[in-house]
Amino acid sequence: MRDNLRDASLTWLLLALASGIAWAQTKPQTLVINGVSGQAAVAQIEGRAYVDVAALAHIANASLSFQPNRIVLTLPSSAANAPVALPPAEHVDNSALTRDFMKAGIEEIALMREWASPLAYAIQNGLPITEEWVADYRASAAQGLSMASVAAATDADRNAFQLLSNEFDAVREWSNKLVEARKSMDTAKYSISSGALREDPLSQKIIACGHFLASMLGSGSFQDNPSCH
């Protein structure tokens, strides 16, 4: 690289001399370009200062090329070496639920209520129930839970889905318990007192978790609650 620049400098000097330019004075001087200093030959011709173009290119870390009718000096772009300014990181709320999951979750809560309410009414009023009858409601709720699982796209969605799944498991346990009680004719205690079924610990847990889930999904942010565990 230095040899090429030296040859270019000599070529330029010979061309200048051949064209009849008279050098009044030539001497090396310190040249500073954008804070970078170096030695360059400076000539005084008719009161004007001329700098060796090859030395200029070397100090400026530029590229220099000679063409038939022109000399091309390409200076490095300061912007190319400047650090890239990154945009500020967008704030992400990790507790936010996605719209699709919220919709699927609310629909699942409605399906579990459609499963639990007719069963509770039948038990409290001494009406006959069968496993096949209950299975239809359970299958619909299971399908809704599956749709909610597919809609869960973020960590907040998945955490909320776990609570929704816990509620489904609780309703299924409660449903199986009532179906077995009906088979063994052990549901009289629920029909004697209108509050007996509601006061059952598992019923209380399901009701509390259901209310919490509806509130959480309506708020759009994941929260936790012991009733859903």
Image (cartoon, grey):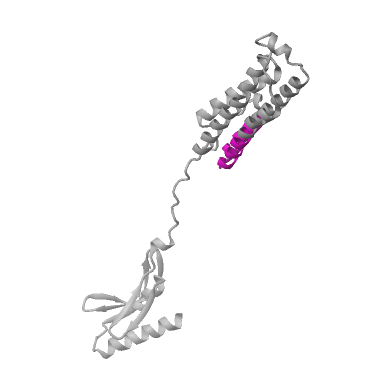
User: Which is nearer the eye, 228 or 186?
Assistant: 186
Decide: is 196 above or below 173. above
Q: Residue furthest front?
A: 128
- The residue positioned 68% from the left and 30% from the top of the image is 132
Foreground pick, 212 / 39: 212
Which image quadrant is residue 212 in?
Answer: top right
Residue at the far right: name it: 184
Q: Nearer the viewer, residue 196 or 15?
A: 196
Residue under the image location 51 percent in, 28 percent down: 218
Where is residue 187? Give x, y as percent: 73, 15
Q: Position of residue 172 (x, y in %)?
A: 69, 28
Range of residues picked out in magenta: 141-166
> In the displayed image of the protein, which residue is found farthest to the bottom?
18
Is 140 left or right of 28, judged from the image as shown?
A: right
Query: Residue 87: x percent and y percent?
Result: 44, 49
Q: Where 62 sits versus 202, above or below?
A: below
Q: Establish if 151 lies above or below 33.
A: above
Residue 130's spot in the image, x, y percent?
70, 26
